[in-house]
């Protein structure tokens, strides 16, 4: 082996890798900047090409050999530069954003079947939404397995998103009507908070029919019906029997209005605490230990299949940055366990929606 020639080859390779103003931008420009593995790789490549191509000529022209090495090393460098350009182009290429799922406020969305809507959900979140729907349907199936039906509306007060199911089905209100009635009373007649406080408290906290009767006998229901219609609940009408038929969507509108009156410092804010820990409220029972809950339930049992056979609940869940209104209407009289389970499932679904889409 020609030791001198081998030495010259190495010098030529290293010479090629010396700084050069004509080098393409982005290529290594000095010995200190060249990775060792690249020096070794180029040296090995050059030696291979020389000995496989020029070695057959024995003592051929050194100039020709050097020219060949230079050409081959230059080719390797060009290939390296091209590879760097390809990688850089790939890094700069933007990944397409996932399309957002169309959003509609849950208060106006169709509710003939289970509906989940939340601003900011993308097609990539659809699998998670499907899983949530499966859990909610399991809660509804528990009613159906016992021969009962239910409808509900969960409305997030900050986003307008939420969950609903058969929110336009009518149910007898029972004592759940007392919650909005008292809210109207103290809004239109704030003086009642002073001289009728005990009566108002018994109406809400203990669901006293006698106390409610005293209020409605004194103040009637015509003005209340006008108040409800002004909020957008034209079908929400108390008749001579002091109760009415309700649907979850309308009930949710009234409780949204109540929330607005409380946070704006209206008269209702002065007595809102009587809505905490109310009798037979599944929302309070299930979530009252985690959040502040304002709610009012309603129930009556005259036998399955009767219009006067319901277990209802409605209220406000003060859940951090995402408080929400929840209304559940059902014909499952006495089955607070079914309502408790559905309340828990819906609250968990609400949590996952806020964490997924914000």
Image (cartoon, rainbow, N blue to C red):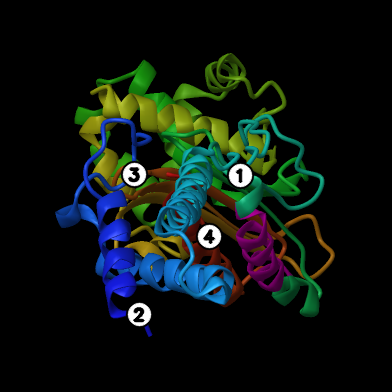
Q: Residue at x 61, y 31 (%)?
A: 105
Real-space Cα separation, disc 3 to disc 4, in angstroms? 54 Å
Crowding near the residue tagged with mark 2, few <14, some 14–19, many ≥20 C-alpha atoms within 10 Å: few
Location of residue 185 with respect to 164 vertically, above or below: above
| Badge 3 vs badge 4, beta-carbon distance below 8 Å | no
**The magenta segment:** 125-140
- In this rendering, the label closer to the viewer, 3 or 4: 3
Q: Is residue 289 visible?
A: no
Q: Is residue 212 above or below residue 187?
A: below
Mark 1 or mark 3, earlier in chain: 3
Q: Label 1 to label 4, Cα distance in Å?
A: 17 Å
Residue ID at (47%, 32%)? 256
**What residue is disc 3 on?**
27
Which secondary structure dominates the residues rendered in magenta? helix
Residue receiving disc 1: 122
Q: Nearer the viewer, mark 1 or mark 4?
A: 1
Residue 142 in the figure: left or right of residue 267: right
| Residue to which mark 4 is pinned | 349
Answer whether residue 31 is magenta in the image: no
> Horizontal and vertical percent for residue 351?
44, 57
Residue that carries the numbered disc 2 in the rendered image: 2
Q: Secondary structure at mark 3?
A: loop
User: Between residues 191 and 162, which one lies in front from this camera angle?
Assistant: 162
Residue 162 occupies quadrant: top right
Mark toward the viewer: 2 or 4: 2
């Amino acid at each position: 082996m020609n030791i001198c020639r081998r030495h010259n080859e190495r010098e030529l390779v290293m010479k090629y890798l010396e700084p050069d103003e004509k080098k393409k931008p982005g290529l290594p420009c000095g010995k200190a900047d060249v990775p060792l593995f690249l020096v070794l790789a180029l040296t090995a490549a050059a030696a291979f090409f020389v000995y496989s191509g020029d070695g057959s000529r024995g003592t051929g022209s050194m100039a020709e050999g050097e020219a060949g090495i230079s050409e081959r090393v230059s080719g390797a460098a060009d290939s390296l530069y091209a590879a760097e350009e390809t990688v850089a182009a790939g890094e700069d290429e933007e990944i397409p954003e996932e399309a957002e799922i169309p959003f509609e406020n849950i208060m106006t969305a169709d509710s003939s079947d289970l509906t989940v809507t939340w601003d900011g959900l993308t097609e990539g979140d659809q699998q998670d939404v499907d899983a949530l729907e499966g859990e909610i349907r399991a809660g509804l199936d528990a009613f159906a397995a016992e021969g009962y039906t239910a409808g509900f509306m969960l409305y997030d007060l900050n986003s307008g998103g939420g969950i609903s199911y058969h929110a336009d089905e009518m149910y007898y209100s029972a004592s759940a009507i007392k919650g909005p009635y008292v809210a109207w009373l103290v809004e239109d007649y704030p003086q009642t908070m002073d001289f009728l406080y005990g009566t108002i408290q018994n109406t809400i906290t203990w669901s006293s029919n006698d106390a409610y009767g005293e209020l409605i006998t004194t103040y009637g229901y015509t003005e209340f019906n006008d108040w409800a219609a002004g909020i957008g609940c034209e079908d929400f009408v108390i008749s001579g029997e002091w109760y009415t038929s309700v649907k979850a969507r309308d009930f949710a509108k009234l409780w949204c209005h109540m929330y607005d009156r409380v946070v704006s410092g209206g008269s209702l804010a002065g007595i809102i605490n009587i809505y905490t820990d109310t009798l037979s409220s599944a929302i309070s029972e299930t979530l009252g230990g985690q959040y502040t809950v304002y709610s009012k339930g309603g129930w009556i049992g005259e036998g399955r299949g009767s219009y006067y056979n319901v277990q209802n609940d409605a209220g406000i869940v003060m859940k951090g940055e995402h408080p929400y209104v929840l209304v559940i209407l059902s014909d499952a009289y006495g089955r607070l366990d079914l309502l408790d389970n559905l309340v828990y499932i819906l609250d968990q679904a609400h949590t996952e929606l806020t964490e997924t889409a914000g």
